[in-house]
Image (spheres, rainbow, N blue to C red):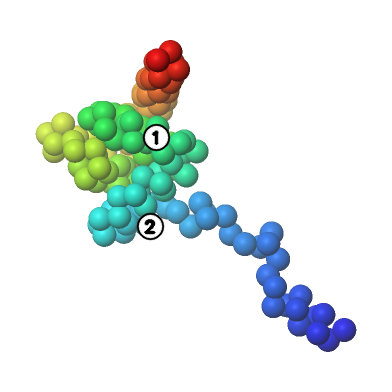
Amino acid sequence: RMQSQTDDEAAPDESEQPDPSERLDSEVLSEALVAGEKDVVIDGIATLSHRPRSFIEKILQSGSAKGITAIAWQAGLTMHLATQIQFQLGGIMPKKALYARDDGSYPLTEEEMRWQIEFFESLMQRDTRRQASR
């Protein structure tokens, strides 16, 4: 019986294990970005935004500051990090980048950001249809 209690104490309950996405946040992804761990950042954005990696890559490769800002917003990241992602992963030049408002908030409205996400969804669907017709 004592052995059974010891085993129960040693084996953590799986329901108590944290969801890996709960450890992801702006601070963790910012540190990864500074460390040059681009894949970690891309995977983190995908996880937090509940989007496939290919969707995140499409936005990052688009050269769209608004698109990158929108996906960072959807992932729950800070606007400061969204700006850094624009530079480092999106190749956006400083003059073309979007920056946080004075209070640190996003410069686009939620409606504008949702539109950006929907726009990229439509591009992904179009690409999928093209590949299927080949």
Crowding at dot 1, Cα within 10 Å, few <14 / some 14-19 / many 20+, comes out as: few
Secondary structure, mark 2, is helix
x then y, percent, for residue 122 = 41, 18
For the C terminus, the image quarter is top left
Q: Which residue is mark 1?
A: 54
Q: Which mark is residue 112?
A: none
From the viewer's perspective, is 60 left or right of 92?
Answer: right
For the point 82% across and 80% down, the residue is 4
Q: Is residue 77 above or below residue 29?
A: above
Q: Residue furthest top?
A: 133
x then y, percent, for residue 84 = 24, 46
Q: How many marks?
A: 2
Q: Which residue is mark 2?
A: 28
Q: Which numbered disc, 1 or 2, marks the residue that appears first in the sequence?
A: 2
What's the distance in space between the residues labelled 1 and 2, CA to CA? 21 Å
Tag 1: amino acid: Ser
